[in-house]
Amino acid sequence: MTVSEVRSRYLEFFRRRGHAIIPSGPIVPENDPTTLFTSSGMQPLVPYLMGQEHPQGRRLADSQLSFRAEDIEEVGDNRHTTFFEMLGNWSLGDYFKKEQLPWIFGFLTDKEEGLALNPERLYVTVFAGDEDTGTPLDTEAVEIWKSLFRDKGIEAKFVPLGTEERGGELGMQDGRIFAYGAKKNWWSRAGVPAKMPAGEIGGPDSEVFYDFGTKHDERFGPHCHPNCDCGRFIEIGNSVFMQFVKRENGSFAPLPKQNVDFGGGLERLTAATRSNPDVFLIDVFDKARAVLEERSGMRYDDNLVTTISFRIILDHMRAASFMLASSILPGNSEQGYVLRRLIRRSIREADKLRIKEAVLADVAKGYGSAYSEQYPYVLTQATHIKDALEREEAQFRKALERGMREFEKVIVSSISGTNEVRTLRAEAVFELITTYGFPYELVREEATARGLEIRDELVQVLLRKHSETSRAGAVQKFAGGLADHGEQTVRYHTAHHLLLKALQTVLGPDVHQRGSNITSERLRIDFNHGAKMTDEQKAAVECIVNEKIDEALPVTRTVMPKEEAEKLGAEHEFGASYPDTVSVYSVGPKDATPEDPKFGRAFSIEFCGGPHVSNTKELGEGGRRFKIKKEEASSAGVRRIKAVLE
């Protein structure tokens, strides 16, 4: 099947079972400063999994765009991608295991409604139990799976492996259902139960693996099993049963409302319908892959080295296309840094394929048409994507030329050892990589050509320290979960709404948000505007925001049809899709109430999931005033403001 066929079959399958189909959230989380990208299907739904009512009801399904920067180095094998779509269905306190597992099994195996996968190729895992939670083996899931396989004429043997290591020692044992511990079959935002903070929710999960029948690679252990990394088994779906909350004393209590959170990788599911474990051979990569073959004169499967280069470029350019279409531009920090890294890695891989002229824009072009049905904005942004990639590729090639000159200077003063064994100091290698943007593999190639050795382990230590420092802030933000709902952050979230409306008042109604980042220390907004703001304009914006704080305006949340919200002129995220029913926050007027928000006289109306203060006067408590700390260029035609309440 094609990616579109698998996606549409999945959504229709769950629509028929009472699920509201909601659109994908943006690849950059809206008003969530805790992470650079949406990295899982559940991320946009965290508030609702935590108890907030969803406008569309208690049964939801979607296909969520996701990006995982931590997987960049993994790309090159047959199944890892940084960018992917995650199919999801959700029960918010509605159905549970006895409905979920049969539905997923039905979707995977049914010939009329589902994917018609051979059930003989499917293997499943369940939770083996855990002392920290005091929860036993998930016997209910075991019995449900046994019954489902039995209905297909398959006697499913249960094997309690317990750990991935024991799986490698014991192997399949003719099993069909395997039990693993919390490391593999427990889900919470913090990881295993012992790492969960008080108030965190989580629960056991049950994964489905597809057996592609490839030969086991003994580098991953003497025996194969579903959680083996040799590539024979690939996970294609995971049903999480959120049924516990951690208490202050470390014990676990059952949740009043149990949730189901299913995630299935769209690309992997499509590969399973083809019985081919290489996700880069599914249809969405066809046009981009053909460009690389034509320009390189090589075939995708000529040899492993060539295949790896193809895969890296195909993955990175797909991710780059969606980022650029979402108004992310290459830069030196945050999302822009990740995008720049994807582009530069792709250029290096193109060099390995002996493609010396610009090629990335032509590769990316194939994704606009491949996703035109589901994500038409990628196609409409084709010219912008092309221009950005060509500009970045040209700049990087110039940087490489400059870098080569620096390389020559550095090696002269950084060689140690005898004439027989000469070593390039690790600190010099680190400087070339971090200061001059030299890819590590290029440093190695140039060093080898000059007969120089590099102490790789020392370089890796320096790079790890650098990486840990760069990511420390993001990691720290993750510690409490996916969203910071602290009092000060909530205040800044509401101030953000006031600021955007004030900017439109001062600079004109064509000003719209192009990005945001809100922490407990400050708020940041990116907005389209072609010129630097004058001091008078900044002062006028500050004055408007502080006036609205002093007016003590009520902040009201209203759930309404999307069309009605659009008619009201409600602001919404650039490039984002929204469900038919949306959450809208309005600020003012003075006499507004949740029952009668009086939109016609509201100061600000925005599509938003919250949270917010209930009244603008809370922003000024303790004598705080709104102040713009910095106004600067973010990218071409986009300005950035950093502001505080102090």
Image: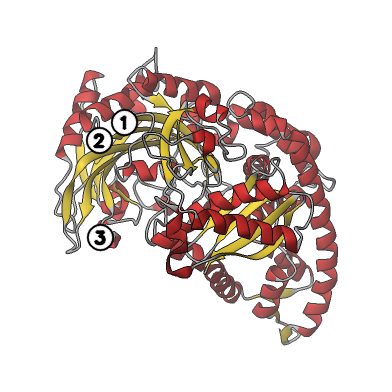
Instruction: Tell me the kind of residue under disc 1.
Output: Arg
Seen at 40% across and 22% down, the residue is: 117
Disc 3 is placed on an element classified as loop
Whether the residues at callouts 1 and 2 have beta carbons within 8 Å, the answer is yes
Query: Label 3 neighbourhood size at 10 Å, few (<14), some (14-19), many (20+)?
Result: some
Answer with left or right where residue 506 lies relative to residue 595.
right
Residue 516, above or below 453: above
Depth check: 191 or 291 in front? 191
Residue 24 rendering spot, x and y as whole percentages: 50, 34
Instruction: Tell me the kind of residue under disc 3.
Output: Ala
Depth check: 158 or 396 in front? 396
Disc 2 is placed on an element classified as loop
Q: CA distance from mark 3 to mark 1?
A: 25 Å
Q: Quadrant of residue 432?
A: bottom right
Q: How many marks?
A: 3
Q: CA distance from mark 1 to mark 2?
A: 7 Å
Image disc number at residue 93: 2
Seen at 67% across and 39% down, the residue is: 325
Residue labelled with disc 1: 58
Residue 565 rendering spot, x and y as whole percentages: 51, 30
Residue 107 rendering spot, x and y as whole percentages: 36, 22
Image disc number at residue 152: none
Answer with left or right where residue 91 lies relative to residue 634.
left
Query: Label 1 neighbourhood size at 10 Å, few (<14), some (14-19), many (20+)?
Result: some
Residue labelled with disc 3: 198
Residue 65 rendering spot, x and y as whole percentages: 52, 38
Mark 3 or mark 2, earlier in chain: 2
Query: Label 2 neighbourhood size at 10 Å, few (<14), some (14-19), many (20+)?
Result: some
